[in-house]
Amino acid sequence: MQTKLTKLLGIRHPIIQGGMAWIADASLASAVSNAGGLGIISAMNANADWVREEIRKCRTLTDKPFGVNIMLMSPHVEEVAQMVAEEKVPVVTTGAGNPSRFVKMWKEAGIKILPVVASTALAKMVERAGADAVIAEGGESGGHVGDLTTMALVPQVVDAVKIPVVAAGGIGDGRGLVAAFALGACGVQMGTRFLVADECTVSAEYKKKVLAAKDISTMVTGRRLGHPVRAIKNTYMNAYAKMEADSNIPDEQLEQFGVGSLRKAAKEGNADEGCFLAGQIAGMVKRAQPAREIIDEIMAQAEKMMEGVRWDV
Ligand code: TUI
């Protein structure tokens, strides 16, 4: 199935793996790329040396294109942005901000740039700055979320820009991929479905929580500090929500409560103190599988649904 996205990136299937902080490493990224999607290494809050190491590891595990996700609120964003240009990684995706100031440097390094956006305004801004495509992510996604749903956001971004649009948020199977095409996107980005990939090195407790999740198992907290995040409901999330609603608790204390919670979930598998970021499709994730099986299953379902259908995506 060739689309503008597969042609732009030189990949077999129009599926990008989300850049999940503390989770998306060389193991998962290389597995997704070897399966014909675009694997992504998350730079999260790590320094340039750590990310460079993962990039080099990934290169030993796959000869296919892969990418690095740069979280723009990272304290190390400047050095990581510079390093990916030096390493000439094939693709960069960005999140949680406006990457326009780095676009010229990345383009000069031959990098394909796909910023994640949650509004048409940012989509237009990054197009003007020179982005190759945008990933329009609705609030059904896990992690840092915008206000709009995927259903409302994607077609409006498609109308607002000329560059290709990838849909993200709430997509977990072949039906979601076909729905994304119907909205005018040329591919999808998925994170949550890949959490249970065999090659995903996240804690066993994290996988267990995703597999046990149902449709209403996630919630959003963090709006008070301006960084809303979606995660699986647990002791930590309920406690955060309570503190957030309590005006006697200062912002600093709330911020302090969040420190380390992603690592506790992803690395330590701390069921009660960890923040288990996941999207609303967690309830659709039924079993652990190799990344290749996940991608093949999604493509087979989508291709069956699209038999006889010809969309210019
Ligand atoms: O970035 C994500 N998902 C993430 S980042 C992350 S790490 C984190 N941890 C705690 C607090 C905050 C972040 C975990 N998950 N997705 C892409 C995304 N970007 N969603 C929404 C946005 C976004 C929101 C506002 C992009 C830009 C923006 O404002 C742009 C501006 O003008 O600055």
Image (cartoon, grey):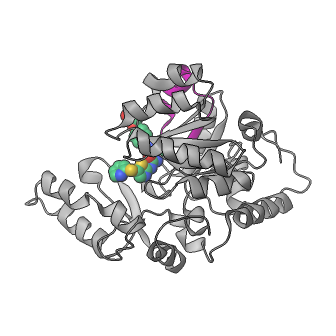
Q: Is residue 78 left or right of residue 159?
A: left
Q: Where 121 falls versus 15 (above or below)?
A: above
* Coordinates of residue 313 in the picture (x, y in percent): 77, 40
Q: Taking the image as four quarters, which one is ligand 1 found in?
A: top left
- Does any portion of residue 116 appear in the rendered image? no
Q: Residue furthest left?
A: 248
Q: Residue at x 37, y 72 (%)?
A: 233
Picture quarter containing residue 5?
top right
Q: Residue at x 45, y 28 (%)?
A: 82
Q: Residue furthest right?
A: 308
The span shown in magenta is: 119-137
Q: Is residue 63 left or right of residue 308?
A: left
Q: Where 104 falls versus 123 (above or below)?
A: above
* Coordinates of residue 277 in the picture (x, y in percent): 42, 62
Q: Is residue 178 left or right of residue 278?
A: right
Disc tally is 0
Q: Where 132 falls versus 58 (above or below)?
A: above
* Coordinates of residue 188 in the picture (x, y in percent): 65, 49
* Coordinates of residue 91 in the picture (x, y in percent): 61, 36
Picture quarter containing residue 301?
bottom right
- Does any portion of residue 5 appear in the rendered image? yes
Q: Is residue 127 magenta?
A: yes
Q: Is residue 288 magenta?
A: no
Q: Residue at x 26, y 59 (%)?
A: 258
Q: Residue at x 25, y 57 (%)?
A: 259
Q: Nearer the viewer, residue 140 or 132?
A: 132
